[in-house]
Image (cartoon, grey):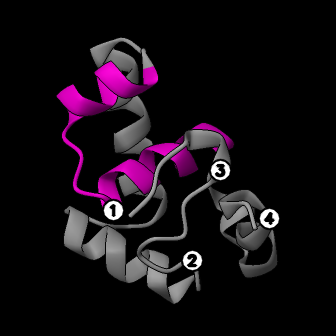
Amino acid sequence: MLAREKAKGSGLGKILSRREQEILSHILLGKTNREMIELIKLSPRTIESHRANVMTKLVATNATELAAKADLYDLGLFTISRATGLSP
């Protein structure tokens, strides 16, 4: 199941864009901004912007809080979209 599909059922898809969900997935896997830049091929500023949006929308100040919030939305720590090509 795609993270987006599961997110739609939990309400997370209404909160985060597809790209923000991808960024959240990378954050939950412990990826740094630099690693995300290399993996997703976006500019540093774009990654920072998406990360800030995710943090704001989920009302989190760090990755630990993001993991807790994702779990609250029943996304789980390692529910990763097939589109990202990531695995836990």
Looking at the rendered structure, the secondary structure element under dot 2 is loop
Alpha carbon distance from label 2 to label 4: 10 Å
Circle 2 residue = 75
Q: Amino acid at mark 2?
A: Leu
Q: Amino acid at mark 1?
A: Leu
**Vertical side of 83 occupied by 35: above or below:** above
Alpha carbon distance from label 1 to label 3: 15 Å
Alpha carbon distance from label 1 to label 2: 11 Å
**Vertical side of 8 occupied by 74: above or below:** below
Q: Amino acid at mark 3?
A: Arg
- Mark 3 or mark 2: name the one nearer the start of the chain: 2
Circle 3 residue = 82
Alpha carbon distance from label 1 to label 4: 18 Å
Callouts 4 and 3 close, C-beta under 8 Å:
no
Q: Across the whole image, how many numbered discs are drawn on residues?
A: 4
Circle 1 residue = 28
- Mark 2 or mark 4: name the one nearer the start of the chain: 4
Q: Is residue 29 magenta?
A: yes
The picture places residue 15, in percent across and down from the top left corner, at: 65, 59
In the rendered structure, which segment of residues is drawn in magenta? Answer: 17-40
Circle 4 residue = 5
CA neighbours of label 2 inside 10 A, class few (<14), some (14 to 19), many (20+): many
